[in-house]
Image: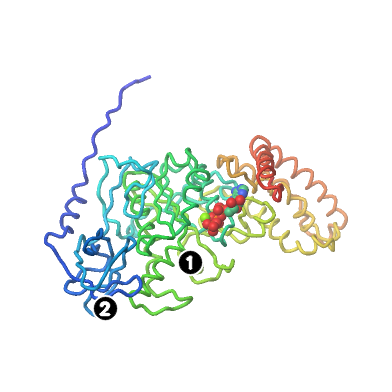
């Protein structure tokens, strides 16, 4: 019963970081003049600066604008403005500001909303305890990364039970527009047991940002989060930087020993921003107009997440799939870089099945290292039922399937409703991971598929009936406390909010 007061010692700035920024500081004035402006590319003569350096464009009588070096035309730097240009002409002055973008990070950023430069946009000043860090970090050394062996709770049953993700894992959420990516990220933010959450909103519409922060994230979600915003109207260089800024904030929390959850919505808009910059710098377009640098930057960004000896960054990157084509180049590249992908299906959303996670199409590559063999087997069995149902859905829906013809299909039909109780979840509801695991174990235990369907005959149908009763009873028992109540709530809330999708539940 010790009641010893804890001392809140002042945080001293990191000496190494301070020395590094001093070395990088521009100690003398490097100045040049605007030579030409083509679209968003400003070519400068009379000075040079390294790639990624920050310069100030200084039109006379107008505020200075920050711009980043994105390439070179022969020896002349090409700059991309990071803020909208109001007035600029050939001959205007340019000044080198710093060799890299830096921002102020630290614990007191929690609950704050900042822009790509780390400047507050929620109307309050930043506190004094923040440390200045360089945004362009390299990724942790691959051999010094501890293995990912602990599960991270997201509070979303479909993920925790069927696609368990680990502390330090990196996953993609793949979906077309308006299918439910942001809502799912909001659910994860509120339901996770991570210590800190950093959210990058890259290229979202301005209206959506306020809506996401107030409605989807809510006060509870915002308390332990830092939100970095660069809306679609901001210049490409700023949208690109937002993802790096969020990653740097997450890295700082990781270095302080925290388990951080990093959510980037969306990595596709990050790639699109780099497409604009790459083309402006004179790179050749390749597949769908993306220049080679996009495919170079994507691995550099996602490799910065992960686990180190100090802490971890578990990252979810949303991927906007144009025309619901999961094979478009960015989706394809990101899928290959990550340790798992969660696919959202528009058909499920239309049916009112939320969150619309397509379990058979999704995979968490590390799941088997994170759960017991019993849970892994249970997940496999439930997946088999879902795949079996999907394969036979056309027959079932037109009434061409006769019950008793195939015991596996009978079992899949019987298990469908109990499985949906597990998978459907109202966005306000959070389920502890143990409960999700218990539910999936009960579902798997409830199935009774005969080993040899050929000799099962009529027994198949009976086993089916038994399976149905059993599965429903068991799943219900497990779900009663939480899922059923939540599902009922979801149904009510949905019915009230959207008369067309009252099926949720
Ligand atoms: N879990 C859920 N429960 C209820 N409704 C949901 C859920 N998820 C999504 N929706 C519905 O789908 C709509 C779109 O969701 P959301 O904004 O999350 O999609 P998005 O994929 O982020 O869209 P965008 O591509 O425009 O960013 C929401 O307005 C809501 O009506
Ligand atoms: Mg969204």
Residue in the foreground of this view, choosing between 233 and 307: 233
Horizontal and vertical percent for residue 130?
A: 27, 43
For label 1, the residue is: 336
Q: Is residue 248 above or below residue 426?
A: below
Q: Residue at x 73, y 48 (%)?
A: 417
Horizontal and vertical percent for residue 87?
A: 29, 65
Horizontal and vertical percent for residue 497?
A: 65, 44
Q: Residue furthest front?
A: 61
Which one is in front in this view, the residue at disc 2 or the one at disc 1? 2
Horizontal and vertical percent for residue 8?
A: 27, 31
> Is residue 368 visible in this depiction of the protein?
no
Residue at mark 2 to residue at mark 1: CA–CA distance: 33 Å
For label 2, the residue is: 73
The quadrant holding residue 274 is bottom left
Residue in the foreground of this view, choosing between 299 and 61: 61
Q: Residue at x 54, y 65 (%)?
A: 321
The quadrant holding residue 270 is bottom left
Residue in the foreground of this view, choosing between 243 and 497: 497
Is 46 placed left or right of 147 in the picture? left
Q: Is residue 433 above or below residue 57?
A: above
Which of the numbered marks, if any, corresponds to residue 283?
none
Q: Are marks 2 and 1 in contact (CB under 8 Å)?
A: no
Q: Residue at x 19, y 51 (%)?
A: 16
């Amino acid at each position: 019963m010790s009641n010893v007061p804890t001392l809140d010692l002042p945080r001293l700035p990191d000496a190494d970081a301070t020395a590094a920024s001093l070395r990088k500081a521009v100690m003398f004035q490097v100045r040049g003049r605007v030579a030409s402006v083509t679209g968003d590319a400003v070519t400068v003569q009379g000075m040079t600066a390294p790639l990624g350096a920050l310069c100030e464009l200084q039109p006379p009588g107008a505020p200075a604008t920050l711009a980043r070096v994105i390439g070179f035309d022969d020896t002349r730097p090409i700059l991309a403005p990071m803020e909208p240009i109001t007035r600029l002409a050939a001959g205007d002055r340019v000044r080198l500001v710093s060799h890299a973008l830096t921002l102020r990070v630290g614990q007191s950023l929690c609950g704050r909303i900042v822009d790509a430069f780390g400047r507050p946009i929620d109307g309050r000043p930043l506190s004094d305890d923040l440390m200045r860090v360089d945004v362009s970090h390299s990724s942790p050394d691959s051999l010094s990364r501890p293995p990912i062996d602990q599960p991270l709770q997201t509070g979303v049953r479909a993920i925790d039970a069927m696609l368990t993700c680990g502390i330090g894992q990196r996953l993609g959420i793949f979906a077309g527009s308006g299918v439910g990516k942001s809502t799912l990220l909001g659910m994860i933010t509120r339901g996770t047991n991570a210590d800190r959450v950093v959210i990058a909103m890259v290229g979202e519409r301005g209206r959506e940002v306020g809506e996401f922060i107030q409605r989807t994230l809510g006060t509870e979600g915002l308390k332990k989060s830092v939100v970095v915003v660069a809306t679609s109207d901001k210049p490409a260089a700023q949208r690109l930087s937002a993802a790096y800024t969020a990653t740097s904030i997450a890295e700082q929390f990781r270095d302080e020993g925290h388990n951080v959850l990093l959510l980037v919505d969306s990595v596709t808009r990050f790639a699109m921003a780099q497409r604009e910059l790459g083309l402006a710098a004179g790179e050749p377009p390749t597949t769908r107009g993306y220049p080679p640098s996009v495919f170079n930057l994507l691995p550099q960004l996602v490799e910065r997440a992960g686990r180190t000896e100090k802490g971890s960054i578990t990252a979810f990157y949303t991927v906007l799939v144009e025309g619901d084509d999961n094979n478009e180049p960015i989706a394809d590249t990101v899928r290959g870089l990550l340790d798992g992908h969660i696919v959202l299906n528009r058909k499920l959303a239309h049916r009112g099945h939320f969150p619309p996670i397509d379990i058979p199409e999704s995979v968490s590559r590390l799941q088997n290292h994170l759960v017991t063999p019993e849970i892994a087997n249970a997940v496999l069995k439930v997946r088999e039922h879902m795949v079996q149902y999907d394969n036979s859905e056309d027959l079932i829906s037109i009434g061409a399937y006769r019950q008793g013809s195939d015991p596996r299909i009978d079992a899949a039909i019987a298990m469908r409703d109990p499985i949906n109780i597990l998978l459907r979840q109202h966005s306000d509801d959070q389920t502890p991971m143990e409960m999700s695991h218990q539910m999936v174990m009960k579902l798997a235990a409830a199935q009774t598929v005969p080993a040899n369907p050929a000799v099962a005959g009529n027994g198949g149908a009976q086993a089916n009936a038994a399976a149905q009763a059993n599965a429903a009873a068991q799943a219900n028992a497990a779900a009663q406390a939480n899922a059923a109540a939540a599902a009922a709530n979801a149904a009510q809330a949905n019915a009230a909010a959207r008369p067309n999708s009252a099926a949720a539940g």
